[in-house]
Amino acid sequence: MNMNLESTYAFYGSLRRGMRYYEEFKYGLKYHHSFWLKGYNLYSLGPYPCAVKSDNPNNKILVEVMKLDDPKVEKKIVRIEMDAGYYYTDILIQNKPVGIFLYERAANYPQVHHGDWVKFFGS
């Protein structure tokens, strides 16, 4: 099971503040900051999004960088993401390694053009 060495992750969907999984796991999540992550596209899977690496560096998604303070919460979140078909990778945000869960490809899912899942989901 892959996990970030610093227990710090970039969440762009249901683990962002106010969303379903954030509410479920917020006792183990500590919000650090929001960040526009360049070089990614966001797609809707219905109730959840997926992010896919883009060839265009101008494409971007809004992520919330969070520290997971509770190892049990971290393991649960990693398992949920991996079981849902995401893959794990580390990226650099402001020169710090941050874990993120991505999809290999978007298939025919509708794109969230503005890159902000909370805005899209709330509309």
Image (spheres, rainbow, N blue to C red):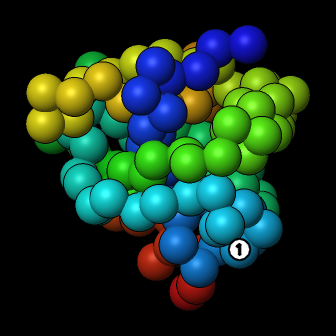
Q: Confirm whether residue 81 shows in the render.
A: no
* Residue at x 76% of width, y 32% of height: 75
Left or right of 102 in this view: 115: left
Left or right of 35 in this view: 72: right
User: What type is the residue that disc 1 sits on?
Assistant: Glu
Report x, y in % for residue 41.
40, 40
Q: Nearer the viewer, residue 68 or 56?
A: 68
104 up-or-down from 111: above or below: above
Q: Confirm whether residue 100 shows in the render.
A: yes
When asked about the image quadrant of residue 8, the answer is top left
Quadrant where the C terminus sits is: bottom right
Q: Nearer the viewer, residue 102 or 89?
A: 89
Left or right of 48 in this view: 66: left
* Residue at x 77% of width, y 25% of height: 82
Quadrant where the N terminus sits is: top right
Q: Nearer the viewer, residue 51 or 80?
A: 80
The residue at which mark 1 appears reads as: 23
* Residue at x 59% of width, y 79% of height: 18
When asked about the image quadrant of residue 40, the answer is top left
Q: Residue furthest top?
A: 1
Report x, y in % for residue 29.
56, 58
Report x, y in % for residue 67.
45, 47
When asked about the image quadrant of residue 38, the answer is top left
* Residue at x 22% of width, y 35% of height: 93
Q: Please, what secondary structure does the residue beneath circle 1 have?
A: helix
Q: Nearer the viewer, residue 97 or 38?
A: 97
Report x, y in % for residue 11.
50, 49
Query: Mark 1 packing: few (<14 Cα in 10 Å), some, or many (20+)?
Result: some
Left or right of 65 in this view: 49: right
